[in-house]
Image (cartoon, grey):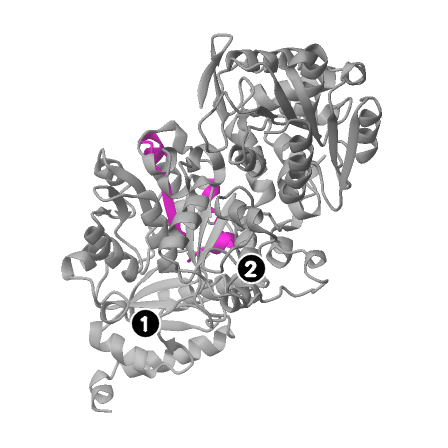
Amino acid sequence: MKFKVNNKEVFASTGGRPFDKSKPLIIFIHGSGLSHITWVLQTRYFAFHGYSVLAIDLPGHGYSEGPALESIEEQGKWISDVIDSMDMKEASLVGHSQGCLVVLECASQFPDKIRSIGLMGGAGAIPMNPELLELAENGDPKAVDLMMDWAHGPAGHFGGHPVPGLHHMNLGGSIVVNGSVKNALGVDFRACDNYKNGFEAAKKIKCPAINILGDRDRMCPVKAGKKLAENIENSEVEIIENCGHMILLEEAGQSLEILKKFIRKNHPA
Amino acid sequence: MDPKTYKFDTLSLHAGYMPSKNAGSRQVPIYQTTSYMFDDVDHAAALFNLERGGHIYSRISNPTVQVLEERVAALEGGTAALATASGMSAIFLTIMTLCNAGDHVVVSSQLYGGTVNLFRLTLPKFGIKATFVKPRDTEGFKKAIQDNTKCIYGELVGNPGNELMNLPEISKIAHNAGIPVIIDSTYQTPYLFKPLEHGADFVVHSLTKWMAGHGSSMAGILVEGGKFDFMKTDKFPTMTEPYEGYHGLSFAEEFGPVAFTMKARAEGMRDMGPCLSPQNAWNVLQGIETLSVRMEKHCSNALKMVEYLSNHESVAWVSHASLKDNPDYELAKQLLPKGTGSMIAFGIKGGKEAGAAFIDNVKLASHLANVGDTRTLVIHPASATHSQMDEATLKLANMSHDMIRLSVGIEDIEDIINDFEDGFRAAKKPRLVANK
């Protein structure tokens, strides 16, 4: 669906069901350069099981009007604006990678609006490799190839997508390339690299949190995810074996089962 | 700093499969089953509603077939792939997923005869009409596009005449008109050419041919490029608007770069059911493991045969884009740097009668209706593969009655040439053959 936030057009997938204000809201926030497409194996389930779902395209990504927001702090505030724009009082947030930083910022800035948070492949800080950052800011497609290489574990490199016939790395890469390497991925990487408030934000969060980590994640390793979890008061950790950074796709089934249990408990439909 | 992603030859052997998820089995297991156990009612409902991935019924998907699909997607650089029972069913599935009654397609006139008949005779029964354009007539493709045109379809190197489409230019024309390009890349395989890197949006293959190589198994596949954005046009409401068959699902909105494959599987395989058997998928996988080494030999043998035929007194003409006087020579150098393939068309002096004598007297080369076997194959298209086409369609395809279609195998080149010498000798004495 399309709607306006701060007078700009925003696109969000509703998981195949019409948006229903009477149902509890879950907002899914994608990672750097990506879009709502990455959440398809989580959103449809919740949309058909009592929740209203918004898998948003951040500004300047997917089908949302640009430009991309240049800081994680702005993006966190923008998620709060999304909740307001939908005339909702609260939501649970689920983020992936950069989306986790956005979740931390939103949940710490607007604690009254956030019921629970799910963090997939998250960390308190995501410093960028300088060469990768430069490639992305210059719009070089090599940045996408490097990102896809590092983001995927064994399944991504060999195969075995949960949805028959889909190819992990080519699908992930096409989402980024179909957007803008320079104006979405480059801006996102710079925002991640600049963001230093993750652990302070985490300490302010009081709502229930779950950290879902992949033991083969090279972008936000388990060690970094556990450190973040230690800074959130009410936090659980789940580690998925043989899984890289693209947890939401590489191990879509396992990550969905963990999320189902967590959200049903902390934000029941 | 470079990505450490696997290269073509490695992907040919490994893509799509992890032994650790299959009891450590080094070879891909053949999942000879129709159906798959659900964990519980919730799991079953989620699978049927595309809320999660997995297998339901082997008409829709199968773990062995899935390995083949991911392998070909990896080799072509696609976001997704869907294997089918044959190349023709892949083409039919693709067109039926894209088009509705009342739609129109622009099609290269030089195609496999079965494909020509699909577009000329069968699809019109479903209200889908085609305009044929000669493959070299790039501007003709533009002129043929109508308001209701939904795609441009062709073979990069046309069967059997070997004329090339200028895919990069034709893709620009299609994209300016808001429609995708579908390329049958059976002749090239991804070893020689990746259409998705040159503007195509979807690729179809008869895997029966060079991809498998052994000539033992029928199989086809559709590969999606992931770049054609159905959401940016109102031409494809079945991709963008809520679909009743899945509780109001918009395939393009939910699945983006894999939307077409998801729809082709969820709707097409469900309703039409041209599924590939796991045994045939496994057979094709065996062939793909050696794709690179076979294609190298196919191409080197083909170049030697082109030279031999071009200098032969019994040959009237040879069509192969490797020849410097071929109108497609420069385009082929640009698009096919690793080789122009192993299909050769040539005309035999003495016309149809001499052609028949030649084919009846070669012994090593097999006379049959296939291409891309490891063995050398010959056929007289006008009396076999393209015999159901009328004179006007044959003319549009630039096919003559003296044409022999040669699929060069990987035998020793001297043996192939010696065999052809026998054929040419007999062709000079057609009356003796006729009396045989």
Q: Residues within 10 Å of mark 2 (few under 14, many from 20)?
A: few
Q: Residue at x 80, y 25 (%)?
A: A228
Secondary element under disc 1, as helix, strand or loop, is strand
Q: In percent of the image, x 40 and y 54: which residue is there?
A: B270
Q: How many marks?
A: 2
Kind of residue indicated by mark 1: Ile
Dot 2 or dot 1: first in sequence order is 2
Q: Position of residue B104 (x, y in %)?
A: 23, 42
Magenta-span inclusion, residue B196 = yes
> Which residue is disc 2 drawn over?
B36
Q: Chain of mark 2?
A: B
- Helix, strand or loop at label 2? It is loop
When the figure is inspected, residue A200 is found, relative to residue B303, above or below; the finding is above
Residue B198 percent location from the top left of the image: 45, 40
Expressed as whole percent of the image width and height from the top left, the position of residue B273 reads 39, 58
Same chain under badges 2 and 1? The reply is yes
x 48%, y 22%: residue:
A11
Where is residue B157 shown, x and y percent of the image?
A: 37, 53
On screen, residue A200 versus residue B19, left or right, reads right
Q: Which residue is mark 1?
A: B379
Start-end of magenta stretch = B172-197
Viewer-nearest of discs 2 and 1: 2
